[in-house]
Amino acid sequence: MIAHLSPNSSDPIKRTMLDFLGMKSLEELYSDVPEEILLKSPPEIGKRNDHIEIESLIESKLSKKVKLIFTGGGMVDHYIPPLVDELASRQEFYTSYTPYQPEFSQGVLQALFEYQSLMAELLGMDVVNASLYDFGSALGEAGRFSIRVTKRKEIVIASNVHPERKLVLRTYLDPVDAEIVEAPMDDVRGTVDLEGLENLIDDSVAMVYIELPNFYGILEERAEDIVNIAHSKGALAVIGIDPILAAIIRPPGDL
């Protein structure tokens, strides 16, 4: 059996330390610990397993999972390739901030270019920015952008949007006195009520925003209709999408 070496665990070293403390045994050292919580014998934790055995055991347990995850709220059960951890640990990807000295940051610039190119292809867009902080700040920037482009001051968002992103959006829009209006949700389907949305859209709306999937983990099946409703009134349509989802449905740029 393999025995792992623990510092100062040999009997002679233990004896030396106990003598220095003026104690006769380990039991005397721990005499302040109540008797009822002391273990009388080592716990039964089974035999030691190596990494491969442990991984195989975990996979066999997970394969028997019969309950699906319907958590929602952006917590989606999906596979992350091991390569992602390796790439994310590289210096080129280690920070999300834009480099200010390009002559010293060619690796970062190349990584950002590759990221932008692949995201543009995945999302069906002509260009993709790469210097926003997170989901919420990207939504906030989209709101401010739409106001500048359309010269309008009203933003319509689906009521099933993540509540934290609503707060971030409000933080971005309050300084420009923009109004946020929530489109009603179909309580049965969990998606946007198209009729209710259409009643909200007029010539004062700068942007209509939905998420795929929404906060409840539901896919807006009529996303294209929502985009068309927004465009019919001269508003911009903005979609917050999980990039993994863009690989199996029509990307936002094609709607």
Image (cartoon, rainbow, N blue to C red):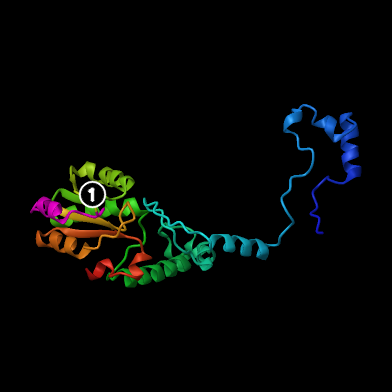
Q: Is residue 7 left or right of residue 66?
A: right
Magenta-span inclusion, residue 149: no
15 vs 111, nearest the viewer: 15
- When the figure is inspected, residue 77 is found, relative to residue 16, above or below; the finding is below
Residue 128 appears at what percent x and percent y?
31, 66
The front one of 214 and 123 is: 214
Screen quadrant of the C terminus: bottom left
Q: Point out residue 168 in the picture as x, y percentages from the top left corner.
A: 31, 45
Residue 134 position, x and y percent, is: 37, 53
**Residue 201 within the magenta-colored segment of the rendering:** yes
Could one spot residue 130 in this view of the protein? yes
Indicate the quadrant containing the N terminus: top left, top right, bottom left or bottom right.
Answer: bottom right
| Residue 249 in the image: above or below residue 35 | below
**Residue 115, image x and y in percent?**
40, 68
Q: Say whether residue 225 is left or right of residue 99.
A: left
Q: Residue at x 42, y 65 (%)?
A: 102
* Residue in the picture at 23% in, 41% down: 174
In terms of depth relative to the viewer, which is nearer, 36 or 107? Answer: 36
Q: Residues within 10 Å of mark 1 (few under 14, many from 20)?
A: few
The span picked out in magenta is: 189-205
Rendered image quadrant of residue 189: bottom left
In which image quadrant can residue 34 be found? Answer: top right
Identify residue for label 1.
Answer: 187
Amino acid at the residue labelled 1 = Asp
Looking at the image, can residue 151 be seen? no
Using the image as rendered, state which of residue 185 and residue 123 is in the foreground: 185
Q: Is residue 151 above or below residue 89?
A: above
Helix, strand, or loop for circle 1?
loop
Q: Residue furthest left?
A: 203
Q: Count the marks.
A: 1
